[in-house]
Image (cartoon, helix red, strand yellow):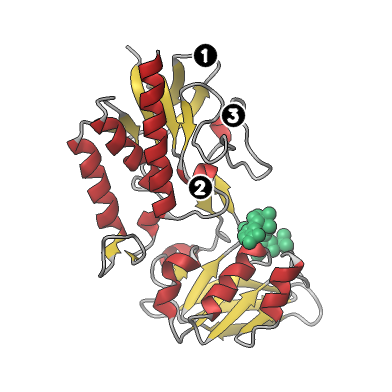
Amino acid sequence: MAISCLILGSGPAGYTAAIYAGRAGLNPVVYEGLQPGGQLTITTEIENFPGFPEGIDANELMDGMRKQAERFGAEIRTATAVKADLSKAPYKVWFDDGTEAECQTLIIATGAKAKYLGLDDEVKYQGMGVSACATCDGFFYRKKTVAVVGGGDTACEEATYLASLAQKVYLIVRKPFLRASKAMQERVMQNPKIEVLFETNTVGLYGEGGVEGAHVVYRKGEADEKAYDLPIDGFFLAIGHKPSSDLFKEWVKTDELGYIQTEGDSPRTGIPGVYAAGDVADPHYRQAICAAASGCKAAMEAEKYLQSL
Ligand code: NDP
């Protein structure tokens, strides 16, 4: 028998959808995916999720959401979707453990992944000085020195935001120019706390028990190549995000970066009973609270759709 509400993803969007769908009696089934708990679980403390005046550990927050979803009857399964057929209801999804599921409604809450440079040290210092979210972790670097990698709008925005907290921000840019919009470039260039290091690549990080600096190379491969160590307390990646939407591109509309495009500010994808919630459909805000809100909307839409059948 088809699952009435299948939810892919276990970040704030997926779990919030499961809480609402569970309370509405839809017996939701949640597939956790590759990163149970979602992107938040790679940060440490969350200080901007309302209701926790002292902040809350990210894993504790996600664990709470999971238990809340289970309390209302959500079944949580551990597998990752590898293929989908959304050509007609009931919709079909195949998983990496060889199983498949049919569903009447589908909530795609598969999130997005921040891109990393691919250095072993980024893994080693994850949550110990390495972050891909200035809004989430910038607060911990008040009056400290940080570096932001990237030359696009996100990097400029994050560098500007961090400069409001930190005492010094290095913007590490691999090209001799910024790719960001003119306005963002000007904001960065005019900020006395931001120093742009053009034509510079990061090749490693160092530090005892946390980031204390980055090994960088200026004009790698050129005659005037120069390798040096840059003392920093925090290393922020801002080289783009990749929404986890590949499986669904054949069926739903996505923008040029792969974010699922929904109808207006609703989570409706245009396919009856199929919704997208959270970062997979949000190129702009990418915040847990926004993801949770869209998960709520998706579950309410699913409930309304099922009632109309
Ligand atoms: P972009 O793809 O625009 O920029 C990515 C940046 O990271 C580029 O400078 C790129 O360098 C650099 N980069 C990529 N890979 C590496 C690497 N391996 N090593 C070093 N540097 C690397 O991504 P954004 O997230 O900045 O922006 C995504 C979209 O969102 C854009 O369209 C942007 O305009 C938009 N946006 C708009 C905002 C606003 O309007 N307020 C705010 C934030 C984003 P290179 O240039 O050499 O390729």
Q: Could you say which quadrant of the image residue 200 lies in?
A: bottom right
| Location of residue 298 with respect to 191 vertically, above or below | above
Amino acid at pointer 2: Ala
- Name the kind of residue labelled 1 in the image: Lys
The x and y percentages for residue 217 are 67, 77
> How many neighbours does mark 1 have within 10 angstroms: few (below 14), some (14-19), or many (20 or more)?
few
Q: Residue at x 20, y 34 (%)?
A: 72
Mark sitting earlier along the chain (3/1): 1
Instruction: Tell me the CA gap for discs 3 and 1.
Output: 13 Å
If the image is split into quadrants, where does the N terminus sit? top left
Q: In front here: 296 or 115? A: 296
Residue 252: numbered disc: 3
What type is the residue that disc 3 sits on? Val
Residue 42 position in % (x across, y down)? 39, 58
Residue identifier under label 2: 112
Query: Is residue 35 shown to the viewer in this render?
Result: no
Give the quadrant of ligand 1. bottom right
Asked whether, in this view, residue 5 is left or right of residue 130, the answer is: left
- Assess whether mark 1 and mark 3 are in contact (beta carbons under 8 angstroms): no
Give the percent coordinates (x, y) of residue 170: 60, 80
Rendered residue at 38%/55% (across/down): 40
Q: Within 8 Å of ligand 1, the CB of disc 3?
A: no
